[in-house]
Amino acid sequence: MSNYHIKHLEEYWQVYRNSVRNPENFWEEIAEEHFLWRKKWTNVLSWDFAKPEVKWFEGAELNITENCIDRHLATRGDKTAILFEPNNPDEETLHITYKELHERVSKFANVLKSQGVEKGDRVCIYLPMIPELAVSVLACARIGAVHSVVFAGFSSTALATRINDCDCKMVICTDGSYRGNKTIDLKGIVDEALKSCEGVSTVLVAKRINSEIVMQDGRDKWLQPLLDKADTVCKATIVKAEDPLFILYTSGSTGKPKGMVHTTAGYMVYTAYTFKNVFQYRESDVYWCTADIGWITGHSYIVYGPLANGATTVMFEGVPSYPDYGRFWEIVEKHKVTQFYTAPTAIRALAKENLDYVNKYDLSSLKVLGTVGEPINEEAWHWYNDNVGKKNSPIVDTWWQTETGGIMISPIPYSTPTIPTYATLPLPGIQPALMDENGNEIKGNQVEGRLCIKFPWPSMARTIYGNHGRYRDTYFSAYKNNYFTGDGALRDAVGYYRITGRVDDVIIVSGHNLGTAPIEDAINEHPAVAESAIVGFPHDIKGNALCGYITLKETGEGRNHDNLSKEINQLITDRIGPIAKLDSVQFTNGLPKTRSGKIMRRILRKIASKDISNLGDTSTLLNPEVVNELIEQAGL
Ligand code: WT7
């Protein structure tokens, strides 16, 4: 039996039981056999969920880029590491071999050093999906700097918040980016953001669209000339197992975004192990995850997990609809993609288009299909299974989070029988628990509750940057000695898990995690707005869309509601990004509130979803009359 590569269901159960009975031995064996360590650990795991404090492989020293690049050079030097597919299909595909990646990362790391970046410094990366994004991530890791990638669809205000929160001294960006047939002025967004970021002394600018941009003297530097001068060798900085590798922001239900801190050794071991098993990766495979590296999916399953396995990982710069809705399938055919990993929102969008877009292409290379980011509805699951997989490629519905660092619950393809909408079974080492409202674990099968994890796993986030108290309060206080995920789930008769969705004020729109508070803050900045509340409602493609309930100050009354809606959406776009725009706005005279003044989102959610059959007890509200008014306004 091999712990490392599971090939059938019996083996899964054997490995799983073993991993739970003796987690430390389990992870130690994997760490020992499959990675390059500069110094061995003295202790596999120490943990205390009350503090909370978790340490894996303490005492060990390593560099993750030696594991993701250097150690493959002898056997896979000429193998493609990164296969770059540009936005424009007429532009050439780039095959970056492991040797070339080694050279690119080394040079980039030397540039970072020459610009004064040191071990432990935070570097903000604000780049489109071009090779420089993966290379700069790895270059930071090469020298022990902490990367903080900000998705290049975020606005200047959102970017500034993230730069300041973790005191980045450098920003890496491009002149601009391509998105289908549009270009985006990324450097302009950076310039705007940096007006409020005093700590940033250097901006490295890569050329992508050759636009005219303003370079600020002393601060902004073109990347290419620096790379041209840089040495091709950069000795990896050896770091400790628990040294931070990166910070990645995720939305909370309240307050500012949370900078989740991931550390080095455990993250590496877990992402490598899960990549191998969840995608049943084999040496000659061509693996493609369509996510952006600006999200955790891209960090773990475009960059670190695949490269730690010496895989070929596709990086796609474009969008599924350009030049037409066949683009994904054209790329699958062109590169004979074997594993394809995407989000339900993309599947739903493509399923709406003509089937010819799929059927035109030869998809027979596919062996495994993946989905992530939100619950996948049954219809989308079948469309994916029938038309893309031709009922021949198992679908892995992978449940996990920015905070978990790697996939937690997922079928093992060709081992675990799949059922639509079920993420199925926990991966080895993962111990889920369902909790009731009183904080007690619900044992047994055919039960539903709040999803927690009972025992540490190697890739869990260790803290929120600069705010350990918030980390404790958010994840470890609701259920004693448990990590609380924020999701609800049910466990069926055979022990399969189905994720039912968020149980907090986080709304997942098109696979993007959005907190209600920052959006409401943006709306409330409008001079005519008195108060607002955001809720999600079901949407065919996005999964959820946002509905805003807004009350106006006296000054706003009598104003044109269409114009107001537009102004409010513009504010949201400026403060957060277009992904957070409202699909529906209802101006109202009041918001339903409890006697303690808390907005009853539960009721608003029902009204926005046009389902008022079961509103529950509204008599305890401070202003029950508002509910009827809202229902009337909505025409229900
Ligand atoms: C939230 C985490 C992890 C990568 C992308 C999202 C939801 C994620 C699934 C799934 C149902 C899912 C959960 C989770 N989610 N995967 N397979 N089925 N829900 O990372 O932005 O941190 O969001 O996404 O609600 O808590 P994220």
Image: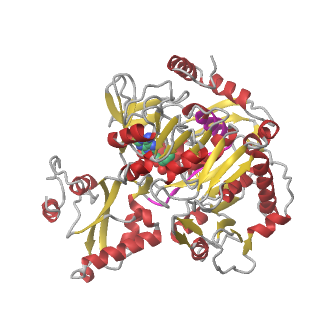
Where residue 220 sits in the image (x, y, percent)? 71, 74
Instruction: Name the quarter showing ligand 1.
Output: top left
Task: Locate residue 70: give its quadrant.
Answer: top right
Examine the structure image and report whether residue 471 is included in the region drawn in magenta: no
Relative depth, front residue between 568 and 42: 568
Picture residue at 51% right of the left edge, 29% below the top:
412
Q: Position of residue 420 (x, y in %)?
A: 37, 34
Residue 22 is situated, as x and y percent measured from the top left of the image, at 59, 21
Q: In this view of the protein, which residue sits in the foreground, 252 or 272?
A: 272
In the rendered image, the quadrant that contains the N terminus is top right
| Label total for image | 0
Task: Determine whether, in the image, residue 633 is placed left or right of residue 99.
Answer: left
Horizontal side of 375 relative to 80 (left or right) equals left
Q: Give the answer, above or below, for where 332 lies relative to 208.
A: above
Rendering quarter of residue 136: bottom right
Report whether residue 345 is seen. no
Asked whether 274 falls inside the magenta stretch, the response is yes
Q: Position of residue 562 (x, y in %)?
A: 27, 76
> Can the viewer see residue 568?
yes
Residue interval drawn in magenta: 255-275
Q: Residue at x 70, y 30 (%)?
A: 31
Q: Which quadrant of the figure contains the C terminus?
A: bottom left
Q: Quadrant of residue 204?
A: bottom right
Q: Residue furthest front?
A: 360
Identify the coloring.
secondary structure
Judging depth in this view, the residue of 556 and 368 nearest the camera is 368
386 with respect to 471 (left or right):
left
